[in-house]
Amino acid sequence: MSKLSQKHLLGIKDITEKDINLIFETAENFKEVINRPIKKVPSLRDITIANIFFENSTRTRLSFELAEKRLSADVVNFSASTSSVKKGETLLDTVNNILAMKVDMVVMRHASPGAPHFLSRHISANIINAGDGTHEHPTQALLDAFSIREKLGGVGGKKVAIIGDILHSRVALSNIFALKKLGAEVMVCGPPTLLPKYINELGVKVELDVKKALQWCDVANVLRIQLERQQIRYCPSLREYSLYYGINKRLLDSLHRQIVIMHPGPINRGVELSSDVADSQHSIILDQVENGVAVRMAVLYLLAGAAG
Amino acid sequence: MTKRKKLIFDSDLLDLTISRLCQQLIENHADFSDTVILGLQPRGIYLAEQIHRKLEKDTRKTIPLGYLDVTFHRDDFRRRETPVKASQTRIEFVIEGKKVVLVDDVLFTGRTVRAALDAMIAFGRPAKVELLVLIDRKYSRDLPVAADYVGKAVNTLPSERVLVELEAQGHEHNRIWLINKD
């Protein structure tokens, strides 16, 4: 009746358009659930989920934890900074130890691209990738596309510009896969040093001028400059980035048309988005956060159901 | 193997039965001032709509009607091959202190009704809950659940299935069949 084609959610690249739509339909039901006076359903009451975060996160981790708790799952949290990883334990050993305590699902964030894929070849629990280095962040892409669908009534045929640090962004890559699968047109825009070399091979347009990108698009998904991933300087200063690529109200007003502004967070206010844009009616940033919980509930529910 | 199909309800009998069920509801609920109707997704909502329409016409009162989906409250999650697809829950009123009539097409094991009681509590604590079903499959209950209003009680084998075809669901005629799966 309704089942995902995959046992894990490692990346958007591996799932089908049908999977994405099934996740969206299920997420709509969960969105209704989390707006009830009692926000909890008992579906996953016999499931234990480990949230394993080898990298810092506030939003994603909180969102996953809320999603798990609203499905009545038992939750254990683990962060690398306070664990035996510091003592030299390998990834596989760490996870196997956690699984030996009878954990059914693993939500993992890791700094190395492909870490969840590696894990999926060695363990039987369902794995959800909550971000692997600069590779993929599937649930973020799903909630972004879900928010576009909710705001504009659909994703197919819509024009979406992803603006900012594309080179270091797992959100950008997962978004490109998801939006292309759902039939949207995608453009990436940023300083040439922050655009990957062969990005147009993914079938996306490339634009260096942010104003032209904004004029073209229905939705602008604005990304953060990821200073923590940059060992060398890709742009002379944040001030210069903000001057050429920052989006402010004056720029939006000069378009003479309404576009939707999205941001996966955390926002660097005054750098990629000015406060008057981030807090404006154009912005659906907080809707994205709300939808994040519903979409993650849908993913957990569908993967857990298949595990039975 | 050939499927054997036995007609247990035709259009005329269905109309008669629904009229009787409505009369029974009116007997017990008089002016419906504190009563709400909840149709169980996915198939109970058609019957709920039909009953609701008739009750509003007969009593000239506005009666709240909602749809309740029990998918996330089922006890067979992870015990079947694929998860059941969820449907919409739409309850735009408070059921706290109200008399709730749950409506479904077929009462079989009673597990859906158990899940419905569980799901309903998320919307408040009703004063009273009643169950109305069109078909009561006798001697097939897994749980101690009984209906307050029954369209027709039928003897069935576990291998049989009740197929409800309603015009509201897009079928040509209102008909209900008993099908042997073997």
Image: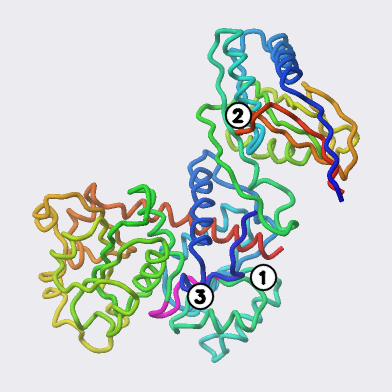
Depth-wise, is mark 2 or mark 3 nearer the camera? Answer: 2
Q: Which mark is residue A103?
A: 1
Quadrant for residue A157, please give it: bottom left
Residue A59 percent coordinates (x, y): 41, 63
Q: Return the residue nearer the eye: A243 or A216.
A: A216
Placement of B23 over or under A29, stated as above or below = above
Q: Return the residue nearer the eye: A295 or A3.
A: A3
The residue carrying mark 3 is A79
In reply to whether residue B80 is colored magenta, the answer given is no
Q: Return the residue nearer the eye: A275 or A32.
A: A32
Q: Label 1 amino acid?
A: Val
Separation of disc 1 and disc 3 at Cα? Answer: 16 Å
Q: Residue B168 carries which label?
A: 2
Query: In the rendered structure, which segment of residues is drawn in magenta?
Result: A128-135
Q: Label 2 amino acid?
A: Ala
Depth-wise, is mark 2 or mark 1 nearer the camera? Answer: 2
Residue plotted at (59% across, 69% down): A6
For numbered disc 1, what is the local secondary structure?
loop
Disc 3 packing (10 Å; few <14; some 14–19; many ≥20): some
Depth-wise, is mark 1 or mark 3 nearer the camera? Answer: 1
Residue B86 percent coordinates (x, y): 60, 47
